Amino acid sequence: MLSRALKMAFWVAYDHLGKLMVANLAASVMCAWPLLIVLAVAPGLSRAAFLAFLLPACAAAVLAGSSCAVALAWMVRGLIETRDGSVGAFFTGLRRFGLRGAALGLCYLFAGACLLSSVWFYASRVGAAHPVLGYGLSAIALWAAVFLGLTALAAAPAMVHRNLGPAGAIRLAAALVLDNPLFFAGMAAHSALIAAAAVLVPVLLACFALAPLVVLQCAAYEMLSRRYAAVEAARAGGGLAPGRHGPVRVDFDDANDDYLNRGFRDLIFPWKG
């Protein structure tokens, strides 16, 4: 399933590269402006004042990035379902889900800050007096932070596909991660590679960093949707007991899916497809 998600993500990005780059550039501008304002006034500020302005600017950039990620998920949903779309879909998604996307980012920002601070607090403060308790609680907080990070890979597509609010999107993402831990571990590894490439190449950071991450998340959500649809069909047909998910043979319809029925030959000789 992961290989299919990666394949679909590649061909979606390949077929709609120009649109995704324009949408990504618009997202980059929206994320960068709070930081650019702080940097513009930085020469006239003391170090303490600069840090006081920088922290809320970083938070504003994160919230803008979350809104843009959900808007991109709306755009990519159309690209996957209809094989066509426009950059206008990104701005439509921003209007429909922008505030919910910012609220989603705020939830993750708050929960992430709490969990990471707990990792430090329990290890350094409690662990100094009660090592077993302190390091045990620190490990629990660390694993909770890892789990939270994995749910972030499914929250944006869950929000746009199911028209959910932040709490509903996080709950659905958590359920998906619990049911497919290895799949999301693989997703996290590939997402980390994309993020590392973007950091190492500044041009990618501005023009094509967020879009490929969202494309991969949406492709993964599509594969999961097809899997669960097969499970429900098997359960409805009496071939699967209630509450069980397998074993079920999932037909991903590769032959009729233009994002899944292409290979390396189509990349080298696209005119022969």
Image (cartoon, rainbow, N blue to C red):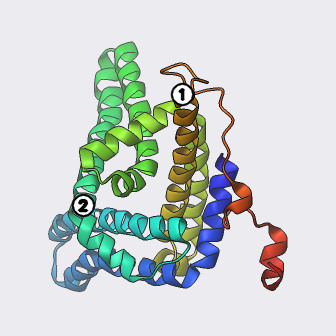
Of 102 and 261, nearer the camera is: 261
Residue 198 percent across, percent down from the top left: 54, 70
Q: Residue at x 58, y 31 (%)?
A: 234
Task: Tell me which label, 1 or 2, sits earlier in the chain.
Answer: 2
Residue 136 percent across, percent down from the top left: 40, 19
Q: Residue at x 53, y 53 (%)?
A: 222
Amino acid bearing label 2: Ala
Of 184 and 11, nearer the camera is: 11
Vertically, is 53 above or below 113? below
Q: Residue at x 32, y 70 (%)?
A: 93
Q: How many marks?
A: 2
Of 201 and 27, nearer the camera is: 27
Local secondary structure at mark 2: helix
Would residue 112 be visible to someone looking at this image? no
Quadrant holding the N terminus: top right
**Image side of residue 143 versus residue 187, left or right:** left
Of 40 and 165, nearer the camera is: 165
Amino acid bearing label 1: Arg
Quadrant holding the C terminus: bottom right
Q: CA distance from mark 1 to mark 2?
A: 37 Å
Task: Give the residue number, with chain letter if any, for mark 2.
Answer: 102
Closer mark to the observer between disc 1 and disc 2:
1
Would residue 59 be visible to someone looking at this image? yes
Bin the neighbour count of mark 1 within 10 Å (Cα to Cα): few under 14, some 14-19, many 20 and up: some
Q: Residue at x 56, y 72 (%)?
A: 83
Residue 57 percent across, percent down from the top left: 23, 69
Residue 150 percent across, percent down from the top left: 46, 43
Bin the neighbour count of mark 2 within 10 Å (Cα to Cα): few under 14, some 14-19, many 20 and up: many
**Outermost residue, front direction?**
237
Task: Give the residue number, with chain letter if any, for mark 1.
Answer: 235
Vertically, is 93 above or below 102? below
- Numbered label attached to residue 127: none
